[in-house]
């Protein structure tokens, strides 16, 4: 089972893949392959767990930005699903220090929103980059394995 997490002192955002659709034959219009995943978010005293539909392409774009920011120790790496129900960024604030900040919007009827923010650092980000690299060694980048 593929998974990755961005951690920070008992707070995190974690993706666990449940299904990868079309692999390896059919890629997504979003890039890579469509994914059904579980997203877990813990921020402060609050926790969320929900099903999330995304793609390896959307995650690959985030991974590419995150690698560059981590190397430069500067900038923001953004992630947004096509449906815009999860959007977050990892922003570098100083020498190796980061803030993870975002919004998850539920897919239920009504306006439910979970805003989160937590601090992390380069050591946690480096682990997340390694986990993502492992995923993309299996699924390829924006064009999948083709």
Image: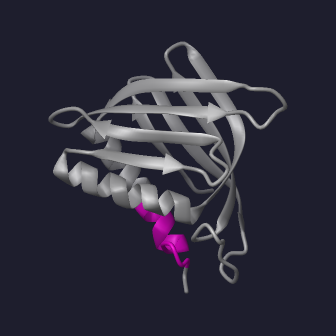
Residue 138 magenta: yes
The residue under the point 71% across, 36% down is: 50
What count of labels does the image hold?
A: 0
Pick the front one: 92 or 130: 92
Quadrant of res 36: bottom right
Residue 64 in picture, x, y percent from top left? 37, 61
Residue 41 magenta: no
Residue lying at the far right of the rendered structure: 109
Quarter of the figure with the N terminus? bottom right
Residue lying at the far top of the rendered structure: 45
Q: Is residue 54 left or right of residue 144?
A: right
Q: Which residues are magenta?
A: 133-144
Q: Is residue 106 left or right of residue 84?
A: right
The residue under the point 48% across, 68% down is: 136
Relative to 45, say whether 130 is above or below: below
Residue 89 in picture, x, y percent from top left? 42, 40
Residue 113 in picture, x, y percent from top left? 65, 26
Relative to 44, say whether 1 is above or below: below
Residue lying at the far bottom of the rendered structure: 146
Q: Is residue 27 left or right of residue 139?
A: right
The residue under the point 52% across, 72% down is: 138
Q: Is residue 136 left or right of residue 99?
A: right
Pick the front one: 103 or 23: 103
Residue 42 in picture, x, y percent from top left? 54, 25
Pick the front one: 67 or 126: 67
Q: How is the image coloured?
A: one colour
Quarter of the figure with the C terminus? bottom right
Residue lying at the far left of the rendered structure: 95
The residue under the point 66% across, 71% down is: 28
Relative to 109, say whether 84 is above or below: below
């Amino acid at each position: 089972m593929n998974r990755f997490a961005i951690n920070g002192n008992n707070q995190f955002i974690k993706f666990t893949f449940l299904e990868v659709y079309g692999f390896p034959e059919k890629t997504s219009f979003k890039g890579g392959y469509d994914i059904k995943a579980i997203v877990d978010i813990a921020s402060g005293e609050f926790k969320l767990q929900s099903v999330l539909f995304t793609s390896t392409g959307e995650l690959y774009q985030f991974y590419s930005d995150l690698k560059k920011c981590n190397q430069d120790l500067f900038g923001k790496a953004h992630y947004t699903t096509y449906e815009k129900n999860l959007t977050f960024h990892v922003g570098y604030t100083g020498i190796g220090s980061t803030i993870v900040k975002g919004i998850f919007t539920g897919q239920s009827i009504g306006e439910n929103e979970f805003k989160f923010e937590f601090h992390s650092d380069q050591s946690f980000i480096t682990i997340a980059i390694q986990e993502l690299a492992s995923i993309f060694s299996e699924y390829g980048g924006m064009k999948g394995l083709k």
